[in-house]
Image: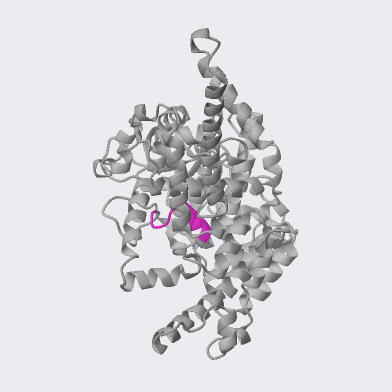
Amino acid sequence: MARIIVGLLGIASLISITGCDPKKKQTAEQIEQQVVAQESKVENLREAMRFIDDLADFNRAEASKEVGYQLNTWMATDRNEVHSTKIPELIRSLPQDIRGYAPLARVDSREFTQADIGHLMQSRLFAAVTKWIATSQTSDAIWKEWLQKPEVAGGKPLSEVGISNLQLAYKFFDWSIRNVQLEGDSKDVEVLPKDARLPLSDTALGYRQLPWQTLMYGRGDFIERGRVFTELARQKNIDTVWLALGKMDSVAPLSIWLLGVPIDDEIFLFDSKLGIPIPGPNQVGIATLRQALEDESILRRLSISGRFKYPLEAKGAQSVIALIDADPSMISGRMKRLQESLTSDLRAELYVDVDALAEKIKKQPKIQGVQCWALPVIARMYADDLEQRLKETNEFTARYMQKHLLYIGETPIITAKYHHLLGKWENSLDEQGAMGLYMASRVPEEDLAKLAYDTDMQQAFDAQRLPNEPLEKFNFRLSQVITIYREAKVDSTYLIGLLHFDQNNLESSRNWLLKRAQGLKGFERWQPSIWYNAARAFESEGKLTEAIDLLRQVPSPQEAGNRLRIRLLQRASGTGETAADGEDVAK
């Protein structure tokens, strides 16, 4: 049946090309040959997508090569105008040393590179995640009621599409905050960092992880965390921009502020450092950029007396620049053509017309200008450089591998995490679901202890000594296997708690987070997120006292945002604020 449908689609496209001109009449054999060629092109795309969608079952490097082969085979036989693609005008807004990055000049190339394949894999992964997040319930006690019928004080009523997009944007933002643990210091909230510039640095903000890596690792700084939100929103055609402060014509780096979501005639504000949308006038709803600049109380109320000083006031935010997040692959003609060719279940948002988006953003109130953001380009540069550096054996490689050990290469938790993100949660006839795979990653400690000497146990874990392998090398490799499984037990226990939350099993979620995860050695690396997610589970169950107790826990890089959330919860519940809370704000 599928072959018949593909054949019909092929014939239809051929008819549209040849029309009914008798001079172009083709023989049945010619038509059949062209239909077969059309089927072959579609099969190339489907085969490429199969490798991407089954990424958990393949080695990423091997899958990338196969996807590249299939896509370039498809492109070689596809009629298109990719070669006439022009470099977007907005690219001129990039710093000169970044504007010269070679991939930016390849917009008219018909060849898919490995970086393109990485972008495609990332987009397909985020598209899969959005499918089930979009259908999840919003149980937030603070914004749930307002989101049902959002009213924008001083502005026009939102359209039905605008309301739907705002509701989705909130879901994607909230999921990103819960699933990407913020890295940094709690006092970082008091600073607006400068935008990234060259040369590359291993300590810089925002570009040391690509969005798919942040999604897999489950941790990142506020920019990396925010870019996860951007990619989720992109897959549902919801635009986002980063708002920065500075002058359009200055060579000095801008100061990065927060995320904005343009909807209808407003830009709604979401702060990935605080972990909350910016509360609107009178702390109701989600603030827009226009409201924040016209009502000075909105930004003033983000400070917490005696604890945190928000780094911006309305009078200091009058020169706002919108930055468009676009990876170099996103602006290429080949990605535009590929996106046009993917239909139905293969669909993913791969291309961004940055010039058209810039014109749309310029019409928004309070925006002084629009630029192409340098950071995504620098992130690609860093990723290219990192790939080469990790081939070397040195202290940097050792530190990097230690930090991301569980999510690089073939480890017991990678397949489980992919199944979780893809929405494959329960066992099927064909494969184990994420829950079963997470549970299988929780190897009993007594089994891990036996691995050091029990040859049967070593064979069961595929960790037996290899022929002619030196004993010292074997012992080192065995210690690594034991470490991986111990680390995997901690992470899988924590992730089971997050999976239960995604399934709306709130009591099970907080039990796994508070009782099981906190009982394991090494859980401390997830402590802030354990407190936060358990608090959100209590909050969704209407147990605000318990939620507030957990939101007060420190240390947490998100402490300022958590204390603001306490204030908003108290307001929503009608309990008010007390001086003992230490969350007083200048009125």
Give left or right: position of 144 versus 318: right
Position of 545 compared to 263: left or right? right
Q: Position of residue 436 (x, y in %)?
A: 68, 66
**Figure check: 37 above or below 287:** above
Q: Position of residue 243 (x, y in %)?
A: 43, 42
Q: Magenta segment range?
A: 207-216
Q: State the image quarter where residue 204 is shown.
A: bottom left
Residue 512 seen in this snapshot? yes
Q: Position of residue 317 (x, y in %)?
A: 41, 41
The residue drawn where x is 53% and y is 61% is 218
Residue 534 showing in the rendered view:
no
Q: Quadrant of residue 399?
A: bottom left
Asked if the stretch drawn in magenta spans residue 587, the answer is no
Assign the magenta stretch its main secondary structure: helix
Q: Is residue 570 left or right of residue 342?
A: right
In the image shown, does 148 or 396 lie closer to the viewer? 396
In the image, what residue occupies the spot 60% across and 53% down?
Answer: 175
